[in-house]
């Protein structure tokens, strides 16, 4: 059947090895030891292409190079082009090429051009461009007589070419070339260390074959690329190596960044297709590759012993595969066909083992793409769009599912679209061709990749060299994307806009989403102590920080369109909060203020007042009830300087949200006194925060993306949407900060200020130094540059981290890409610190030269950090004079105090020990003390450091302490475990330290009540700890132990109170009798009153009965009977109340009689309790007639029972008796 998916298994018992002979060739001359092997493409068209930079969040186009200078040394059987030798000397690379048949002699230097270096002499052309060297030419053979008979012809003629990569430190200037006797010699000088061009990755396809498809296997790093003439190759990018934790050397060099350390380890050509390979898909679960060509031939490839072979093939005659896709589990593949007949297609679903599962032919339907989707692998949030459809007219429709009633429609203004979600569904890449206007005004087609978020918000664009992007594929982590462009594969590094911030010196906070919960997790990580705190926030949208605080912007509630601003400390605890009723897109925080902004509205919130602020405006606002929140609309900012901007009512945001602006806000920057606002048109507004008034307005022909103020508000760094960094020198502000006066130069910027002659391209991050307004660090592609004064860069450092801080001549970065692969387990290896050139050179001078030379260098390059380094080194060398000068110049007053203290020491060994302590080298200091036989000082040092384990060791070794110090050490160790809630271990050390108080706490916490009770009998009487023990027993309901502790502590009343609380009345009475306690009556009466107030009469009766307070209990029972009688309740219940009351009266009489008949000496403490007071508590009539109520209800019940039993006579007689009793 033609429409069936037929998969035939091919015999692979004798596998044929496919040898890659087309893409790369390696050449080296083994007879020269200093030769450096090279790798070169054989194609004449294999030129090197320049990578481009993604704006802001995107890095450079292409990963770092697969260096030709790292290839293995071996001699290939065939090399296209002239054979080369490359020899490396200290100053240059010597390239020698054999060009037999070309004997012309020449020498000279290559001229420097803007984009390339070219030298041509007759038949030989040498070109240096984009980090590559190309030697080409033409060899001709003399014409021979046609009558000659040729037996052997081995000399070749025609054009030849040879291209190689140049090392990164190869210079583009002053390259000399000479040729003599058919040997071309090039001398390429080296750059100074670190100044080489960045390596470029290139994967060039031989013979200029156009690529049609590229697919990236996310599990193993394989990349399949297919193109015209049946071209199919499998390359493999090795995963980056683990991070090297080696500490940086004194020169400040760091180990290679993992983001820049990919290697090409596989390059195999797969032969089997005769037509253009147009579709390639990976089955990651089963490690298979499926490809299809223009004739409909499908081949399934499998890896066997490191080589790819055909496993199954299928050919659906006269049908072309439009697209195919494996399911997530790799069990099924869906293939869509486009038949020869117009508008006719077919869908077939097959299994991984080649069986057909389902198929359907579709009439009048032209199929183009297929995709499995269910959202199981993590979309950014619930109900987020996950389905994107591209149309021929350049528009894209983004939907939540195929039945979405309100899809998002995007207009890309491009043709020939390819679209692909990243693995997490958070970014959509769209490639196509767009018309662009050159600087000369000419229109030309440009290949572009656009990026959108899951809600269709435009992120950035990337221009790619070449005519057309035929295919694209994401890496698994979403940090790189592969682009098939003409005959090349490019790789672009993605710089995601993570939600993160760095503050409080060592705190790194970052947000991430777990797909099993709707809230955003924020982890606060102390990079110094490795302590971590996790907080949950509802839909975090922005994070920023400054000083000791960070700002979180999150959705307040799903039901309302308001956002919550939270100022949090280093452990994530909220300090202050505010709500705004618009959606902030930008946020900044200072030590006292929070500024958030949308595209048209700015909200200012001063969450705390600076201690030293005492301006007149602050005084007025304090009188008015404190600093208030302020908000204004961007269109209300006029061109008039020093005029306060009209403020909006915080309740009128809905009304003002209807006011749209044609020039939206793109970014903001803020200091304690100044707010800079950048608008899309290139207009910059300088606003005084104190008065909310316009100070200056600048206009620059630029579209800003990020702006940043330096530490003294004198310069503004401007990063535009294409990654170009410029600097604006702001107009000079007066002391009040609100005069509008400026210092201008040539009016290079409209409105005052001066646009500095400085520009850097491909920049995606910038950080000003916190202690120097002229210094800053930038990230440019995968390199970091540090700029000091005069905007002169230092040698670049390879790094792809995000800049955290720049202070004290050190730049701290974090590898967020690696950290967020496992965000819940951050490692200190992800934090990299780089020293500036001044710091490195000062350290080198101190190591290799004299202290005086270092001082001379620091005098020429003054900085507090360098003077601190001088003073520390002088201290180590006991040169106290230079150390004092260094402390003075570095403003280190604590260091000066320390210096004065050690000057008083008469022993140099003691001075060395104190200096070792100053630098934190405790081991060295202790060793010095022990060598001079001062163990007491060693113990004192360890005591000050809190190293109690070592204190115990030193004391036990003898000669330095007493038993009291040893007990103190044991107790301190116990405190260490106690503070960390390891109470069982703390008990061990408290026992040795005899710390009864802490033992009581630990036994109570770990619920060891037996040992806690034993402590009662080891403590002396009336010890204050006994009451503490008793209270703990009371809290857990152990009455006997609590009473024992109270009695030994001499608190009889507390013991009786405990018995009463635990309702052990007999024990309370016994205690009162034994200890002749007279206050129990009052206590019981008070307790009974509380019960009666709570309407707990039965409980009060029980209390009186157990306390032998019979008249009270009888009276309460009598009242209950009377109330029940009036309410007409059950007669039997009423009778019981009367009977119980009568029994209590009888018991009262018996106790009274016993008391009167007893011996006076045997009268107990209950005399007061049982004293009879007939006049005050109960009436004589009640005592005499207490049984009458019970008798009356008895006869009443009996009469009723007799009547219903038919004994009418007996019932009448009983009724008469009842009548008499009632009367």
Image: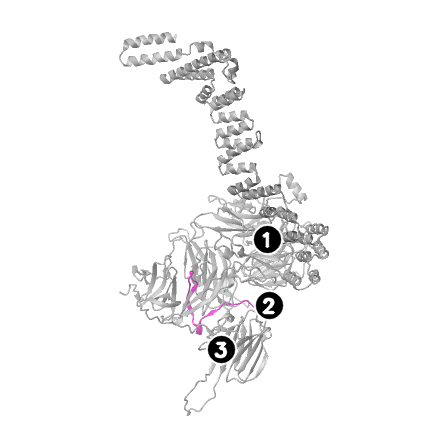
Residue under label 2, please give it: 193
Q: Earlier in the sequence, mark 1 or mark 2?
A: 2
Residue farthest to the bottom, as pictured: 147
- CA gap, disc 1 to disc 2? 36 Å
* Element on which disc 3 rests: strand
Residue under label 3, please give it: 161
Q: Residue at x 51, y 61 (%)?
A: 258
* Start-end of magenta stretch: 197-222
Could you tell me which quadrant the N terminus lies in?
Answer: bottom left
- CA gap, disc 1 to disc 3? 53 Å
Q: Please say which color scheme the image uses.
A: one colour
Q: Is residue 988 left or right of residue 741?
A: left
Can you give x and y, in whole percent of width and height, for residue 835 in the image?
61, 59
- Reply above or below: 939 against 296: above
**Label 2 near label 1: C-beta < 8 Å?**
no
Residue farthest to the front, as pictured: 958
Give residue 318's quadrant in the image.
bottom left
């Amino acid at each position: 059947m033609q429409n069936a998916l037929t998969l035939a298994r091919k015999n692979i018992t004798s596998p044929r090895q496919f040898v890659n002979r087309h893409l790369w060739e390696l050449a080296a001359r083994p007879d020269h030891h200093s030769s450096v092997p090279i790798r070169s493409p054989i194609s004449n068209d294999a030129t090197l292409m320049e990578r481009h930079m993604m704006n802001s969040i995107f890095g450079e186009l292409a990963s770092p190079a697969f260096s030709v200078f790292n290839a293995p040394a071996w001699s290939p059987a065939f090399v296209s082009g002239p054979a080369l030798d490359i020899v490396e000397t200290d100053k240059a690379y010597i390239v020698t090429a054999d060009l037999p048949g070309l004997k012309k002699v020449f020498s000279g230097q290559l001229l420097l051009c803007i984009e390339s270096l070219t030298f041509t002499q007759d038949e030989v052309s040498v070109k240096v461009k984009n980090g590559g060297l190309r030697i080409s030419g033409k060899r001709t053979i003399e014409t021979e007589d046609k009558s000659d008979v040729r037996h052997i012809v081995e000399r070749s003629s025609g054009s030849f070419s040879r291209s190689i990569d140049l090392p990164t430190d190869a210079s583009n200037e002053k390259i000399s070339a000479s040729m003599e006797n058919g040997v071309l010699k090039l001398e390429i000088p080296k750059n100074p260390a670190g100044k080489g061009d960045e390596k470029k990755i290139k994967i060039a396809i031989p013979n200029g074959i156009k690529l049609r498809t590229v697919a990236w296997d996310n599990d193993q790093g394989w990349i399949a690329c297919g193109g015209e003439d049946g071209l199919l190759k499998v390359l493999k990018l090795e995963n980056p190596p683990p991070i090297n934790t080696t500490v940086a050397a004194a020169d400040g060099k760091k180990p290679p960044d993992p983001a820049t350390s990919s290697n090409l380890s596989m390059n195999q050509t797969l032969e089997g297709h005769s037509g253009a390979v147009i579709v390639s898909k990976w089955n990651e679960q089963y490690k298979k590759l499926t490809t299809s060509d223009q004739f409909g031939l499908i081949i399934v490839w499998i890896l066997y012993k490191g080589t790819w072979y055909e496993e199954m093939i299928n050919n659906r005659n006269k049908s072309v595969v439009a697209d195919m896709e494996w399911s997530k589990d790799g069990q099924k593949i869906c293939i869509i066909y486009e038949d020869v007949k117009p508008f006719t297609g077919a869908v077939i679903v097959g299994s991984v083992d080649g069986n057909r599962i389902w198929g359907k032919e579709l009439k009048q339907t032209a199929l183009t793409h297929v995709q499995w989707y269910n959202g199981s692998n993590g979309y950014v949030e619930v109900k987020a769009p996950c389905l994107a459809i591209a149309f021929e007219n350049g528009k894209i429709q983004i939907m939540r599912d195929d039945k979405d009633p309100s899809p998002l429609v995007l207009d890309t203004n491009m043709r020939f679209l390819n679209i692909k979600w990243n693995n997490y569904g958070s970014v959509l890449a769209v490639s196509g061709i767009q018309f662009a206007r050159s600087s000369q005004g000419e229109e030309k087609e440009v290949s572009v990749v656009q990026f959108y978020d899951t809600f269709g918000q435009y992120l950035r664009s990337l221009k790619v060299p070449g005519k057309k992007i035929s295919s694209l594929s994401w890496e698994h982590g979403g940090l790189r994307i592969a682009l098939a462009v003409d005959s090349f594969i490019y790789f672009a590094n993605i710089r995601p806009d993570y939600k993160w911030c760095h503050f409080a010196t060592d705190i790194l906070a970052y947000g991430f989403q777990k797909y099993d919960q709707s809230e955003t997790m924020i982890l606060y990580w102390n990079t110094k102590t490795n302590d971590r705190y996790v907080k949950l926030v509802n839909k975090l949208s922005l994070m920023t920080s400054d000083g000791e605080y960070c700002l979180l912007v999150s959705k307040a509630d799903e039901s309302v369109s308001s956002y919550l601003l939270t100022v949090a400390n280093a452990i994530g605890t909220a300090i202050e909060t505010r709500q705004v009723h618009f959606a902030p897109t930008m946020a900044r925080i200072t030590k006292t203020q929070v500024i958030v902004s949308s595209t048209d509205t700015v909200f200012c919130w001063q969450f705390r007042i600076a201690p030293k602020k005492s301006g007149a405006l602050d005084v007025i606002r304090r009188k008015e009830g404190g600093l208030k929140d302020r908000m204004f609309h961007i269109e209300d900012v006029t061109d008039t300087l020093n005029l306060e901007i009209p403020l909006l009512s915080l309740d009128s945001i809905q009304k003002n949200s209807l006011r749209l602006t044609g020039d939206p806000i793109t970014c903001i920057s803020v200091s304690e006194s100044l707010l800079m606002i950048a608008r899309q048109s290139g207009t910059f507004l300088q606003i005084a925060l104190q008065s909310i008034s316009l100070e200056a307005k600048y206009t620059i022909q630029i579209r800003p993306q990020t702006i940043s103020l330096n530490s003294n508000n004198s310069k503004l760094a401007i990063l535009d949407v294409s990654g170009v960094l410029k600097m604006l020198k702001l107009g000079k502000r007066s002391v009040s900060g609100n005069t509008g006066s400026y210092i201008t130069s040539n009016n290079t910027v409209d409105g005052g200020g001066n646009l500095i002659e400085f520009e850097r391209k491909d920049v995606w991050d910038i950080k000003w130094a916190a202690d120097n307004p002229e210094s800053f660090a930038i990230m440019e592609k995968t390199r970091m540059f540090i700029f000091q004064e005069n905007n002169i860069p230092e040698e670049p450092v390879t790094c792809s981290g995000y800049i955290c801080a720049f202070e004290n001549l050190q730049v701290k970065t974090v590898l967020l890409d690696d950290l967020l692969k496992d965000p819940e387990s951050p490692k200190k290896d992800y934090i990299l610190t780089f020293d500036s050139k001044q710091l490195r050179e000062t350290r080198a001078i101190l190591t290799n030269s004299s202290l005086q030379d270092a001082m001379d260098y620091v005098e020429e390059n003054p900085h507090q950090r360098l003077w601190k380094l001088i003073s520390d080194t002088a201290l180590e060398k006991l040169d106290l004079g230079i150390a004092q000068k260094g402390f003075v110049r570095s403003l280190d007053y604590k260091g000066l105090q320390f210096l004065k203290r050690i000057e008083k020491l008469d022993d140099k060994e003691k001075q060395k020990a104190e200096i070792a302590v100053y630098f934190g080298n405790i081991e060295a200091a202790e060793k010095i003390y022990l060598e001079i036989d001062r163990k007491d000082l060693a113990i004192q040092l360890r005591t000050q450091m809190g190293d109690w384990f070592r204190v115990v060791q030193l004391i036990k070794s003898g000669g330095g302490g007493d038993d009291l110090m040893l007990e103190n050490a044991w107790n301190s160790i116990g405190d260490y475990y106690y503070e960390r809630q390891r109470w069982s271990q703390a008990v061990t050390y408290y026992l040795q330290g005899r710390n009864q108080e802490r033992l009581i706490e630990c036994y109570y916490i770990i619920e060891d009540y037996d040992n806690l009770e034993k402590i009662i009998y080891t403590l002396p009487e009336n010890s204050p700890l006994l009451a503490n023990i008793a209270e703990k027993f009371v809290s857990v309901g152990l009455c006997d132990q609590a009473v024992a502790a109270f009695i030994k502590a001499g608190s009889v009343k507390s013991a009786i109170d405990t018995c009463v609380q635990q309702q052990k009345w007999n024990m309370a009475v016994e205690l009162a009798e034994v200890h002749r306690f007279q206050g129990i009556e009052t206590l019981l009466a008070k307790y009974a009153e509380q019960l009666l107030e709570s309407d707990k009469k039965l409980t009060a009766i029980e209390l009186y009965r157990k306390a032998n307070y019979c008249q009270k209990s009888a009276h309460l029972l009598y009242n209950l009977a009377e109330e029940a009688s009036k309410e007409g309740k059950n007669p039997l219940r009423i009778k019981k109340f009367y009977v119980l009351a009568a029994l209590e009266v009888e018991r009262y009489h018996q106790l009274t009689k016993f008391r009167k008949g007893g011996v006076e000496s045997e009268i107990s403490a209950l005399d007061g309790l049982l004293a009879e007071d007939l006049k005050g508590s109960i009436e004589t009539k009640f005592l005499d007639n207490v049984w009458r109520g019970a008798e009356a209800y008895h006869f009443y019940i009996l009469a009723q029972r007799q009547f219903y039993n038919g004994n009418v006579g007996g019932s009448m007689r009983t009724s008469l008796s009842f009548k008499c009793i009632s009367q």
